[in-house]
Amino acid sequence: MSRKTKFIFITGGVLSSLGKGLASAAIGALLESRGLTITLQKLDPYINVDPGTMNPFQHGEVFVTDDGAETDLDLGHYERFTHAKLGRNNNYTTGKIYHSVITKERRGDYLGGTVQVIPHITDEIKRSILSAADGVDVVIVEVGGTIGDIESLPFQEAIRQFKSDVGKENVIYVHLTLVPYIATAGEVKTKPTQHSVKELRSIGIQPDILLCRTDRFLSDDIKAKIALFCNVDVDQVITAKDVDSIYEVPLVFHQQHLDDKIVELLNIWTRAPKLHEWEKLVEKIKNPKDSVTIAIVGKYIHLRESYKSLNEALFHGGLGNDCAVELDFVDSETIEDTNVETRLASAHGILVPGGFGSRGIEGKIRAIRYSREQQKPFFGICLGMQMAVVEYARHAAGMTGAHSTEFDKQTPFPVIYLMTEWFDYQTQTVQKRDPDSDKGGTMRLGAYPCVIKEGSTAYRAYGRKEIFERHRHRFEFNNALRERLEKAALVISGVSPDGELVEIIEVPDHPWFLGCQFHPEFKSRPMEPHPLFVSFIRAALEYKKAQSD
Ligand code: GLN
């Protein structure tokens, strides 16, 4: 930590899902626009060591960082809104904190002392906060959960203590609450906010800024009332109004001088904010010139949070083409027997995303076959790529019964299988995997290099030969069947530098059919849409135009 590093702690009140992650990301964007270097960190109250083993239905997407950490999806917002470099130090859970305290206790580090929540757990939390602080001007720490929850108390106590540790001029607390409009009364109500702040003050934290989530701008009277009851100045009460696009949030905050207030309270001198890029972005979002429909054929379609980065990346791909992207979520189980053609007819492109488990797998394969045969743009990501290989093997390379050994251990053609030995770029070692080992920690995770074949669809999209993309999977393309698939014209257009890991496949004589073993969606940003998504959406647009000609 440099001597002058400042800390902003963001807590949430009243209820969850008010958009704390987005508010944190937007504050990060505003501070960067003033020339400050920042980082963001998420503290999660649950006991899992990381969200890696959690079901997407419960927790939403698992976001993967370059260094291979499996993290909370809020880190995805942070990366999309800012240039912060995030990794395993940017997300701590209660489980991870306890894990390291208990490891130290077993090692005898506490010299026979009684290990307690205060000070041992709180000290560990404070150390974790500092671990993300190296070399930046401001650290923005989002505390998960809601004020009043039992589980988040140690985190709240730690951030309270933190202020005296690093000096009160270096810390501010931002509290996000709800100010609901009650139709029968015809007015907004401030009581939930008052109670939430009372709760926060009872644990010793006086908020410096209140972000009030509401569906309308708050009047001066309401702001004055909140200020009075919550012991802040009126200009420290900010309306966090609902917006059409999440990318408007930084501008809405800026209009109310939130960034001015933050730098004033933290006593930082900065240049004036440069928000031109954000203004241009919002302008673009509001004025698309065309639109395409993309069918996402997957399993977790009822919970949009499960495909957070994917949805955003498709949206960014649209921005790269001045085009709106309508998403049509298709439950792959519903197209297992019949119905594929009718269900997918209105889509201009089809995407099969990543996933685990066999449910609906044959539906995905049918959707892939349909896109291949109908010459409809197809994008397969991770599991989507693996199933594209299975589909091709079965229906274009004469390998009846081909499958991934994840779903059929006895398949005569295991085109996708568990590789037991490979050179691992992340650790720079030869890794060995026992097929019967534990679920946690056995995946290929994080950024890996990939070399692209010139002249391929991938090369046209990226415009360069070497790329780094993030992975999260166990199974791989089986090299023993590679030659046979290539003889049947499957194009292998991306491989690891040693040539051993197949990373991208394509189908020839098709306008756009590409599968990648990695997750490109994790690296897409609104201002720098990911090349594969831009290229895929362009192909979908061209498909749409060709249909209407
Ligand atoms: N289940 C597949 C594997 O583990 C794909 C994983 C994914 O799509 N993220 O290899």
Image: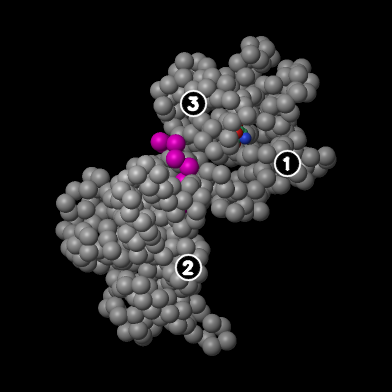
Q: CA distance from mark 3 to mark 2?
A: 51 Å
Residue 5: % across, % down: 21, 53
- The numbered mark, 3 or 2, whose residue comes first in the sequence reads 2
What kind of residue is marked 3? Arg
- The numbered mark, 1 or 2, whose residue comes first in the sequence reads 2
- The numbered mark, 3 or 1, whose residue comes first in the sequence reads 1
Could you tell whether 542 is left or right of 423 in the image? right
76 shown above or below 492 = below
Residue hosting label 3: 460
What kind of residue is marked 1? Arg
Task: Tell me: is circle 3 under 8 Å from ligand 1.
Answer: no
| Residue 69 belongs to magenta span | yes
Tag in front: 1 or 2: 2
| Residue 521 belongs to magenta span | no
Q: Residues within 10 Å of mark 1 (few under 14, many from 20)?
A: some
Q: Residues within 10 Å of mark 3 (few under 14, many from 20)?
A: some
SS of the residue at dot 2?
loop
Q: Residues within 10 Å of mark 2 (few under 14, many from 20)?
A: few
Q: Nearer the viewer, residue 303 or 493?
A: 303
Does the image show residue 271? no
Residue hosting label 2: 149
